[in-house]
Image: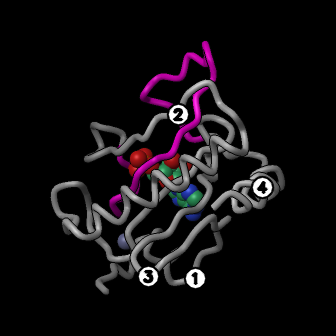
Amino acid sequence: MGRDPDCVFCKIAAGEVPSFMLYEDDATLAFMDINPANEGHALVIPKEHATDLYTVSDEALARTTLTARKVAGAVTKTLNPDGLNLVQCNGPAAGQSVMHFHVHVLPRVNDDCLSMNWGLKLGDIDAIGRLAERIRQWI
Ligand code: AMP
Ligand code: ZN
């Protein structure tokens, strides 16, 4: 399975960088975003390294999408948000900051006024860990 030695998500997949893991199978991983745009913000990645939507393999894309649906269901069971976005960014102009294909699972709240260009603001790490534990129950 291809990896990029400088890629933080490849390092998470290899267990070399810590994460609040939600789900893992042979092809995909899901973990909490440590700069949550809203409570419950999670990320889903293929284990094999690919930069973006255009280079990810069909198999990895399909598996990532299936895992995203699974995680979205668990987040919704946990938090009962008003809505939920799957967001996927390609290139810096689209807001991509980590060059390993990923899908954001982003719960929404009525009138949260979230725009597509949210900044990075470190979350409450203890609270993220506790929430990861709750979401895992539903996967
Ligand atoms: P994007 O801007 O679409 O590339 O999204 C990358 C996301 O990865 C951002 O929301 C970051 O908060 C998140 N992120 C970066 N490094 C980590 C990490 N070590 N653990 C969890 N989330 C991360
Ligand atoms: Zn990678």
Answer above or below: position of 83 versus 106. above
Q: Which label sits in the foreground, 1 or 3?
A: 3
In the rendered image, residue 41, in percent from the top left (x then y), is placed at 60, 44
Task: Tell me: 112 left or right of 78.
Answer: left
Is residue 109 on the magenta stretch?
yes
Q: What element carries label 4?
A: helix
Q: What element carries label 1?
A: loop
Q: Give the range drawn in magenta.
A: 96-120
Mark nearer the N terminus (1 vs 2): 1
Answer above or below: position of 119 versus 17. above
Q: Name the residue under label 1.
A: 15
Query: Contact, CB < 8 Å: mark 2 with mark 4?
Result: no
What label does residue 84 carry, if any?
2
**Three-letter residue code for mark 3:** Asp
Query: Contact, CB < 8 Å: mark 3 with mark 4?
Result: no
Asked whether 132 or 19 is in front, the reply is 132
What label does residue 99 carry, if any?
none
Q: Mark 4 points at which residue?
A: 134
- Alpha-carbon distance for marks 3 and 2? 26 Å
- Alpha-carbon distance for marks 1 and 3? 14 Å
Mark nearer the N terminus (3 vs 2): 3
Which residue appears at 63% of the width and 23% of the height?
A: 109
Q: How crowded is mark 4: few (under 14 residues within 10 Å), some or many (20 or more)?
A: some
**Three-letter residue code for mark 1:** Gly
Asked whether 88 or 60 is in front, the reply is 60
Q: Residues within 10 Å of mark 3 (few under 14, many from 20)?
A: few
Task: Say whether mark 1 is within 8 Å of ligand 1.
Answer: no
Q: Mark 3 points at which residue?
A: 26
Task: Say whether mark 2 is within 8 Å of ligand 1.
Answer: no
Residue with the most extreme top position: 111
Mark nearer the N terminus (3 vs 4): 3
**Three-letter residue code for mark 2:** Leu
